[in-house]
Image (spheres, rainbow, N blue to C red):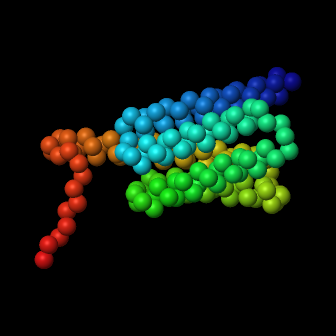
Amino acid sequence: MKIALGCRLGAILFQLIDSWIAVTSLPIVCLAALLFGDQSERYSAIAIFISWLAVMLIESTAKWQFGYLSFMAIDAVLLVFLALIGQKTRKSWLMLAIAFQAIGMFVHACHALDLKFSASAFVIAIDISGYGLTGSLAVGTYIAWREREALKAFGLSQRTTITKSN
């Protein structure tokens, strides 16, 4: 009896810790991207944060039949937006963010097509997608900040492209 209660309590505690990590890490990373990132990090942070708020709002208020399709639509819009930013800037962290968002979209599509997989696999894949997206934004923000600091150290105000002349 004690072991079963301990296992159940441990699972509940893990769910609480997992939720708190998700709820605190995304706004912190988005704020850091707004403060220290370049234009692509800022735009991506705004889009990711707005989509996260929309999902949280729908999740907390909607008890209607097509709530899941709205999650899929929000994630699809975010995927297209990140792809457009990635096409213009060609930053490596954005390609990673797009890949993680595509994992989330693949899971949504599997669920929409009623493919059979376990609930834990669904939750794990969605968590990997969300944490990967947040982590890639954090890495991109760090890279942009370090590049800016390195340019300041050399007395440059902006990035310059070095071309090879013949």
Whether residue 49 sits left or right of residue 34 in the image: it is right
Q: Quadrant of residue 47?
A: top right
Between 1 and 102, which is closer to the camera in this rendering? Answer: 102
Instruction: Look at 60% across and 31% down and name the residue there.
Output: 23
Give the percent coordinates (x, y) of residue 3: 80, 26
Give the percent coordinates (x, y) of residue 46: 51, 41
Whether residue 137 sits left or right of residue 79 in the image: it is left
The answer to whether residue 55 is above or below residue 10 is below
The answer to whether residue 80 is above or below residue 54 is below
Instruction: Look at 49% across and 37% down and name the residue there.
Output: 30
Q: Quadrant of residue 15?
A: top right
Instruction: Look at 48% across and 36% down and name the residue there.
Output: 29
Between 19 and 28, which is closer to the camera in this rendering? Answer: 28
Between 52 and 147, which is closer to the camera in this rendering? Answer: 52
Name the quadrant of the C terminus: bottom left
Instruction: Look at 49% across and 46% down and name the residue there.
Output: 44
Q: Is residue 14 visible?
A: no
Between 27 and 50, which is closer to the camera in this rendering? Answer: 50
Name the quadrant of the N terminus: top right
